[in-house]
Image (spheres, rainbow, N blue to C red):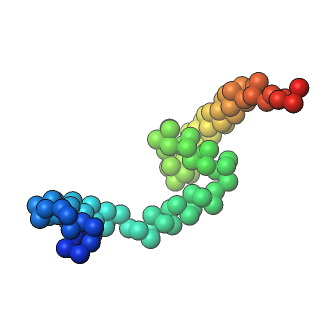
Amino acid sequence: MLVSGSSSWSILSTAAADRVNGATAQFASATSGLGGSSAKQELYDYASKSPAEKMRAAILGKLGLTEEQVAAMDPKERQKVEDQIKQMIKDEVTQQAEEKKGVLVDFKA
């Protein structure tokens, strides 16, 4: 974003305009390496996951693991992790159910 004289930015002093241009240039260069199309693909991949897959991904993140790391584990270690994931999912669902108790109220009465 470049600031020129004929826009609403024209009321800014030249020094202020230079600071704005410098900041936007730094932001553009800092974000240019993020790979816009891959970020879009990652967002699409995440959005297309089922709620169960999203929950599993979140739990793996809490454990500091990825699906690839789990797949590469030996069977005993993988089973321990899978059991831990199942327990964490059960705990999360139970906690959410308990938080919702008493939420429904009949206002017509």
In front: 27, or 58?
Answer: 27
- Write the residue at 26% across / 72% down: 7
Question: Which part of the image, by quadrant, shows the N terminus?
Answer: bottom left
Left or right of 22? Residue 71 is: right
Question: Which part of the image, by quadrant, shows the C terminus?
Answer: top right
In front: 64, or 30?
Answer: 30
Left or right of 81? Residue 108 is: right
Residue most extreme to the front: 11
- Write the residue at 62% across / 44% down: 55
In front: 90, or 83?
Answer: 90
Residue 46 visible to the viewer: yes
- Horizontal and vertical percent position of residue 106: 84, 29
Left or right of 15? Residue 108 is: right
Quarter of the image for residue 86 reads: top right
In front: 67, or 1?
Answer: 1
- Write the residue at 56% across / 40% down: 59
Residue 75 visible to the viewer: no
- Write the residue at 50% across / 38% down: 62
Residue most extreme to the right: 109
Q: How many labels does the image show?
A: 0
- Horizontal and vertical percent position of residue 14: 11, 65
- Horizontal and vertical percent position of residue 71: 56, 51
Is 14 above or below relative to 73? below
